[in-house]
Amino acid sequence: MNITSPRIENGSRRDFLRSAVQAAAGLTLAIYLPGTQAATAAAAAPEFEPNAFVRIGTDGTVTVIAKHVEMGQGAYTGLATLVAEELDAAWSQVRVEGAPADARRYNNLAFGPVQGTGGSTAMANSWEQMRKAGASARAMLVSAAAAQWKVPAGEIRVSEGIVSHGARKAGFGELAPAAALLPVPADVPLKSPENFKLIGKHAPRKDSADKVNGRAQFTQDVHLPGMLTAVVARPPRFGATVRSFDARKAKAVNGVVDVVQIPTGVAVLAHDTWSAKKGRDALRIDWDESRAFKLDSEEILAQFRALAQQPGLVAHSSGDAEAALSRPGRVLRAAYDFPYLAHAAMEPLNCVVRIGEGECELWYGAQFQSIDQPSVAALLGLPPEKVKINMLYAGGSFGRRASKDADYVLEAVQIAKASKSRAPIKMVWMREDDMRAGYYRPAFHHALEASLGEDGRPTAWRHRLVGQSIIAGTAFAGMMIKDGVDAVSVEGAANLPYGIPALRVELHTPTNIGVPVLWWRSVGSTHTAYSTETFIDELASSAGQDPVAYRLALLGKHPRHAGVLKLAAEKAGWGQPLPAGAAGTRRGRGIAVHESFGSFVAEVAEVTVNADGSFSVDRVVCAVDCGMVVNPDVVRAQAEGGVGFALSGALHGAITLKGGVVEQSNFHDYAPIRINEMPKVEVHIVPSAEKPTGIGEPGVPPLAPALANALAAATGKRVRSLPIRTEELKA
């Protein structure tokens, strides 16, 4: 079966591009890492493949090929900015297209030979690569103009997509055919920051207009000829399997075409989503739960708490913490519980699959192509290059689409493979599927102890963490697990920035918990920042010292931590009294600072607490040091979004199990924050000459501890488990 182009419901961008490329000559440019086979091939080839970072059409359109998925974080805008800056293109002539699955050309430089989006690496790993792509294209356009005009290339100017020399002018499109025949320069100079026109400046997002006018293409917008929609019935408990099923009532539903069993359950295929759901709900399934996971959430945490009483694997050790903690003196202890958390992205999981003769094509918001492509290939017995992935927009992810085992993509392919119809399949998860059958941020228990010297500063610190490993058993284990310690579980704890003479961090990773876990926005820092930053605040309080001054005294070797801490405190008016609230209320201000993904963020939260324990978060002041800023609007948006995302988790987030069954099902019992709960957020960016680091995730970790510290300042009560329970804050 020959694979042809699908019809896209919300627009014809793909058809337009394809016809434009066929009808007109242009310039296509790829930048490869030196020393790779791809680089050698590119240097030898007189023309470039269309799968490149830059493509310039004869109409002057500059197409940036984005290797990172756009899921709301601004990756398309950032990547386009890097190219357009060095190309000296007009922002209006630049458009962005998702890259195909091809790790040889589109690998994430932070991950090695892996194509994927995650870890807040999009700008950090593309900083020089995409700029070089733009600079090389510019150099080739200039060389083409110099040859045509018979003038020195050094005398030619490029600005806003126009190449000029005196009175002579030409647009990129006019020069593209000639430039395409030239060799790619081996090395090109990049601009100095003082010459930037786009980087660090305001530029409208490249995805906004299409998302407003409906032309943006998400998985739900894909409609192939003869396509069927599939909805899956999954077991109520993790680890259960299908013993038998009765599909008679499901097949009687109007619109249902087929019912097939797959490893994860039973799929109902229909002409539309609603019919497939009705058919799924009409199934009668006998589940084999002999190997199902059946513990309650409280039983899981009880097991974790017991493990925390015993020494674990050593993640970090400096000085003799055990000896220091055993000496007479002040020792503070605290224990923290963190629940499972769902990703709950606005767009539940979905994927479109078409299987042909010796090939397979997929359409979805692909986040981890180097996991998905070989996994599908292995399932179908195909070479990986015969699995084509069309990367569409994703309606959020927060880590869920970066599946470590390609679970939902494989599920879609298994349905298509099992179906007798051989029709293309759109597999759709309902919100309840996403909530109850998904992968979660692991539940964790933390136990901390610290001894204080006469000056009130910690002389020793011991931190034991207990929780499931995300990395164990995956392709990343060899790279991210050392001496049995999962680096993801202890990030933010094992690299604690405070100057403490004796520091010991230990980890337990129980393997008998059958709840599937996955990275969640900011991963390990989502719980380590909370325990460490609330505990350090408690030490400061015990010592009778100001929380900001206390931290600064311990951050002597970490100037960037100190920098954002000072900035957030200054902008929040730290040290000045908060205005009094209404009668019967108490007000408080709290602070937290944390490094994640190479970026440094400090946040100050201001709260008002009522007599019944209810409270409002009135204001959050955020200071960000993420290196050189590509687009300040995107940085602010990501910091603001991180505050809202973290606040949802702190106020409401908890996936709980009863007898192994997930109790939550939708937004009525796993609630995001409502608009009236969102505080005023101020974002202040630290000017920096450092290379860009992550911003999609680092705004999340400091919020919950800053909030808890503000509540403690208002009420004197420490919050040691999340989500926050108002009954614990009553007057």
Image (cartoon, rainbow, N blue to C red):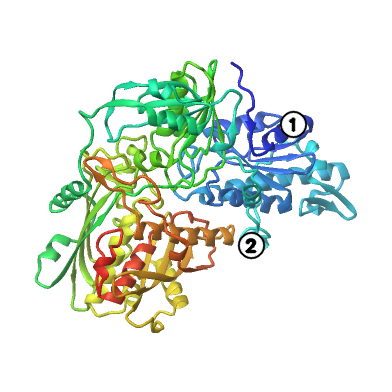
Q: Residues within 10 Å of mark 2 (few under 14, many from 20)?
A: some
Q: Disc count in the image?
A: 2
Q: Position of residue 435 (x, y in %)?
A: 37, 43
Of residues 291 and 675, the one nearer the viewer is 675
In the rendering, which numbered label is found on residue 210?
A: none
Q: Answer with the quarter of the image where residue 391 lies.
A: top right
Q: Secondary structure at mark 1?
A: helix
Q: Is residue 38 shown left or right of residue 639?
A: right
Q: Amino acid at mark 2?
A: Lys
For image coordinates 51% across by 51% down, the residue present is 124
Can residue 113 be seen?
no
Q: Is residue 647 visible?
A: yes
From the viewer's side, name the closer residue of 595 and 229.
229
Whether residue 512 sits left or right of residue 388 in the image: it is left
**Marks 1 and 2, Cα distance to the nearest angstrom?**
34 Å
Residue at disc 2, secondary structure: loop
Left or right, 235 with reference to 635? left
Q: Amino acid at mark 1?
A: Ser
The one of 160 and 418 positioned closer to us in this rendering: 418
Nearer to the camera, 61 or 728: 728
Residue 602 at x, y = what percent? 41, 67
Q: Residue at x 55, y 47 (%)?
A: 126
Instruction: Look at the picture and state if 193 lies above or below 440.
Output: below
Q: Quadrant of the C terminus?
A: bottom left
Residue 201 is labelled as 2
The answer to whether mark 1 and mark 2 are in CB contact below 8 A is no
Side (left or right) of 487 relative to 565: left
Pointer 1 residue: 19
